[in-house]
Image (tube, rainbow, N blue to C red):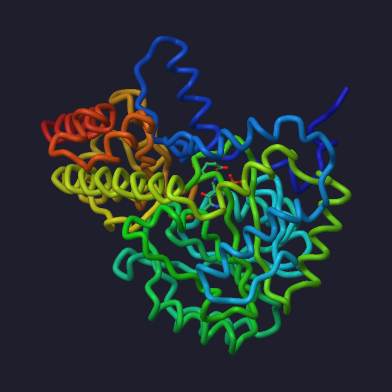
């Protein structure tokens, strides 16, 4: 009835997104009675703040289609939020609401006639989205020595060597998969290069509010005219499944924003009305939201510190993260012992660790690294977020990890044991 060659060429070679696939595989193994610690999908472990849930309940009768660009009062609230954060003059006209930032990122690429420039490593979906649209992807290889940051000279050199192309660059900080971010000095230096070459930069700041220190700066502060901020409710508000994403545009990029609204009007129309009403509460300053963010940052910081120290003790290498819930872990020091066991790629490594140690994680090649570099991404999210949050509200105790994150402790034990077994070979 339908042959594979009837598929559109841009879709034919695509595989399901790695993050979602590992989650389904892990769930299948669990359904078969296997024990799996789920460090694959990067989903917030925390519940949606109670005040936001109450707003959703109160808005359950909102049934009308909403404006394509988003509910006016939500757009105004989001603009105020970014005004406070960046000091820039955002208004409700600057904001676009969509069904997850993933879809907005896709629509932005669709609307903008440009190839895509991304750092390696980057989040799994930027490049496949470009491929779906028949766009070329260029990569800026970043390194652990530079805390995975794009260097201004590197960006400048790329732009000089490729002068003809309009350039769309996506920068994500704190980063998925590394957890690293940019300080003010680096943002300023990148802004200068971007201005010189008239880049359009999507600042994917979906993990901004998870920054452990609570202090965050946006590229938009230093390069307002060319920066689109991308964010949503999925990470800091624990609401991945609510599918609310947003972008904030400068006046200079209004034609791009308007074109995206046309795409929205012909595709998804507008996102769920109750969710948009509830999101107003999420973006309105309140002591409840402050307490929620404060406690979640404390929890994430504690876990990150624990995991980094445990994994470094096993001769694994990684940069200490500043936000988000990821570690980008290198197994190079185990290269020979692993090769001895027939493990020479990151994919084989993840598969064997899943099969033999019951820990699910993703290979670095899903994020653009070469398989033989032996990177893996760990999402440290397999714990009861509600319990951890309420415990952190009264301060992190000494045995917090054992008490509230036993599965993460177990994951470190299992990895350590699995690597120890390799040593005996
Ligand atoms: N950007 C990054 C870096 C991500 O990790 C994710 C994953 N959720 C997204 C964008 C998309 O998030 P959402 O569609 O849930 O807003
Ligand atoms: N962003 C999350 C991750 O990297 C999962 C959701 C997604 O990829 O859409 O694991």
Q: Residue at x 70, y 83 (%)?
A: 164
Q: Residue at x 39, y 30 (%)?
A: 38
Give coordinates of residue 123: x percent, y percent: 51, 52
Q: Is residue 96 left or right of residue 17?
A: right
- Tell which of 117 and 57 is nearer to you: 57
Quadrant of the image for the C terminus? top left
Give coordinates of residue 325: x percent, y percent: 38, 46
Give coordinates of residue 321: x percent, y percent: 32, 56
Res 374 seen here: no
Q: Residue at x 20, y 35 (%)?
A: 400
- Tell which of 135 and 340 is nearer to you: 135
Q: Quarter of the image holding residue 296?
A: top left
Q: Quarter of the image holding residue 323?
A: bottom left
Q: Is residue 138 left or right of residue 44?
A: right
Q: Is residue 57 left or right of residue 237?
A: right
Q: Quarter of the image holding residue 73?
A: bottom right
- Tell which of 231 and 171 is nearer to you: 231
Res 384 seen here: yes
289 above or below 93? above
Q: Residue at x 52, y 60 (%)?
A: 205
- Tell which of 210 and 191 is nearer to you: 210
Give coordinates of residue 386: x percent, y percent: 38, 31
Q: Is residue 212 left or right of residue 7?
A: left
217 above or below 319? below
Quadrant of the image for the N terminus? top right
């Amino acid at each position: 009835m339908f042959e594979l060659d009837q598929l559109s060429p841009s879709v034919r070679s695509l595989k399901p997104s790695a993050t979602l696939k590992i989650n389904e595989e892990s769930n299948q193994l669990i359904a078969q009675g296997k024990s799996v610690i789920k460090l694959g999908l990067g989903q917030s472990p925390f519940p949606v703040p109670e005040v936001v849930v109450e707003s959703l309940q109160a808005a359950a009768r909102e049934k009308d289609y909403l404006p394509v660009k988003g509910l006016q009062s939500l757009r105004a609230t989001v603009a105020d939020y970014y005004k406070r954060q960046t000091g820039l003059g955002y208004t409700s006209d600057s904001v676009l609401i969509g069904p997850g930032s993933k879809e907005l990122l896709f629509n932005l690429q669709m609307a903008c006639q440009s190839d895509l420039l991304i750092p390696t490593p980057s989040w799994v979906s930027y490049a496949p989205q470009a491929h779906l649209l028949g766009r070329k992807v260029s990569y800026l290889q970043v390194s652990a020595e530079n805390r995975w940051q794009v260097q201004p000279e590197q960006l400048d050199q790329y732009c000089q060597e490729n002068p003809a192309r309009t350039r769309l660059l996506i920068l994500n900080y704190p980063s998925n998969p590394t957890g690293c971010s940019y300080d003010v000095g680096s943002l300023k230096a990148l802004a200068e290069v971007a201005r010189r070459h008239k880049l359009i930069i999507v600042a994917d700041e979906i993990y901004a509010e998870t920054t452990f220190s609570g202090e965050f700066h946006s590229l938009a502060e230093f390069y307002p005219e060319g920066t689109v901020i991308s964010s949503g409710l999925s990470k800091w508000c624990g609401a991945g499944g609510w599918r609310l994403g947003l972008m904030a545009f400068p006046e200079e990029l209004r034609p791009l924003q308007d074109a995206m609204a046309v795409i929205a009007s012909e595709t998804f129309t507008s996102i769920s009305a109750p969710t948009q009403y509830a999101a107003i509460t999420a973006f309105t300053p309140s002591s409840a939201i402050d307490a929620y963010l404060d406690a979640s940052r404390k929890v994430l910081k504690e876990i990150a510190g624990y995991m980094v120290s445990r994994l470094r003790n096993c001769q694994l290498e990684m940069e200490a993260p500043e936000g988000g819930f990821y570690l980008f872990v290198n197994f190079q020091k185990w290269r020979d012992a692993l090769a001895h066991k027939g493990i020479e790629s990151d994919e084989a490594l993840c598969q064997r660790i899943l099969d033999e140690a019951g820990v699910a994680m993703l290979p670095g090649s899903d994020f653009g690294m070469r398989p033989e570099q032996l990177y893996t991404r760990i999402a440290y999210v397999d714990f009861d977020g509600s319990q951890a949050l309420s415990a952190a509200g009264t301060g992190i105790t000494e045995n917090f990890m054992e008490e509230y994150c036993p599965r993460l402790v177990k994951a470190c034990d299992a990895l350590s044991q699995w690597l120890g077994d390799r040593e005996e070979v």
